[in-house]
Amino acid sequence: MLERLHLQGVGPSPELHFELGSRLNILTGDNGVGKSFVLDVAWWALTRTWAGYPVTPRRSAEILPRIRFTYRSGEESLEEDYTFERPVQKWFTESGSLEKLGIVIYARADGGFSIWDPARNSSSESAVDVPPEAYHFDTGQVWDGLREGDKHLCNGLIADWVAWQRERGPAFQQLASALEVLAPSEGEPLRPGKPMRVSLGDIRDIPTLEMPYGPVPIVHASAGMRRIAALAYLLVWTWQEHQHASELLGREPTTEITFLIDEIEAHLHPRWQRVILPALLKVVDTVTQTESAQVQTLVATHAPLLLASIEPMFDEEVDRVFTFELEEQRVVVQEVPWAKQGDAVGWLVSSTFGLKQARSREAERAIEAAEAFMRKETASLPPGLGTWQEIQQELQRVLAGHDPFWPRWIVAGEREGALRS
């Protein structure tokens, strides 16, 4: 697992430093401040491959471009130091270490996935048939399979799901268990149904999910369900193939798994957002059927409900929250001291997300004007909100009748009755 990550002269800031937790790391911040970039670099540090375009230093960088990281493999802590050689546009290290960690699963924001398996993707262990650097799936390949030239690398979710279901072997049991763990609630289970044909132009049987109103082909399920199904499938597929490869190599399967997930809440209803992180930490044990699995997770999110969902389980010894902020045209990353905020609204207005009000911008502006009015700071009132009557009219327009701000405003108005005349 990654223990430290230090970036210099590369990325949205001259320097970024992370002391990562061994279990859960949450990256928060506005769009465009570097969360996805850090996940890409974390993938590279764990695999020495790029999931997309290679990261290169900023051309204006005045310091030596460097990526340094420390990771733990078993009981050993290893440090790597890479610098960028501009003439050849590559990252190099003098140590020459090619150590690899365990399985890495990267769920990208575009719906694609990247998979690293140390038993299948390490060329040093495959003298005859050199495997690909890593497995990169776009959204179509997740469903229909991955090929590289004449090599058939993955059958895809549709074919494997149906084959596993007909075999009724360990793989299907693991898939069903993973779907059960990742379901939004006990009342809304994700259960595989009977495969069915969906069109005259496709002779394949398509997996289905049992819904309260009947079976739904997985290709017609909601975007959120498809993403969860893809995550469950690729976890099971990766674990199954890793076991097969480890047996061929005559070695023990790894117990180390790292999840990198960009915009983990993408397409998920709030009911699902509230359970996805705890479920993700549990699902690996469910699939691998071992309590010795070491799982590290790095997720980027914009959802305050996700932070609220982990309050009962957050452990400051193994978990971290980082926030990315733009200050004076540079990005600053800070580890947020852990403190429960109570609910999604509390997180939304906390320093982690930084909103002043969990309301519309218009409501925020009206309430700030009302509060300034109550403090008798009339000189700071914005145009159009300079009198009690104007503020009252705007509050009525933008606030719900049961908004908790109303009692304060009404009492203040009664006390300052003369001002309303």
Image (spheres, helix red, strand yellow):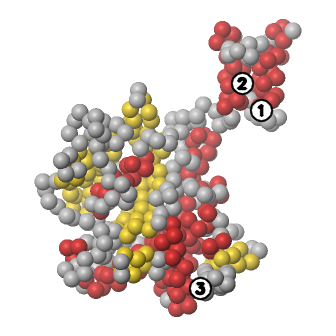
Marks 3/2 in contact by CB < 8 Å: the verdict is no
Q: Position of residue 150 (x, y in %)?
A: 36, 82
Residue designated by label 3: 204
Q: Seen from this angle, which residue lies furthest left? A: 94
- The vertical placement of 199 against 25, above or below, is below
Q: Label 3's element?
A: loop
Q: Position of residue 51 (x, y in %)?
A: 37, 60
Residue at image point 65% right, 70% down? 221
The amino acid type of the residue labelled 2 equals Ala
| Quadrant in the picture for residue 188 | bottom right
Q: Which mark is residue 399?
A: 1
Q: Label 2's element?
A: helix
Q: Position of residue 236 (x, y in %)?
A: 46, 76
The amino acid type of the residue labelled 3 equals Arg
Classify mark 1: residues with Cα within 10 Å, few (<14), some (14-19) or many (20+). some
**In this picture, residue 205 sits left or right of residue 132:** right
Which is closer to the viewer, label 1 or label 3?
3
Which is closer to the viewer, label 3 or label 2?
3
Residue at image point 12% right, 54% down? 94
**In this picture, residue 115 sits left or right of residue 109:** left
Measured in 3D between alpha carbons, the distance from the residue under mark 1 to the one under mark 3, in whole angstroms, is 53 Å
Residue designated by label 2: 366
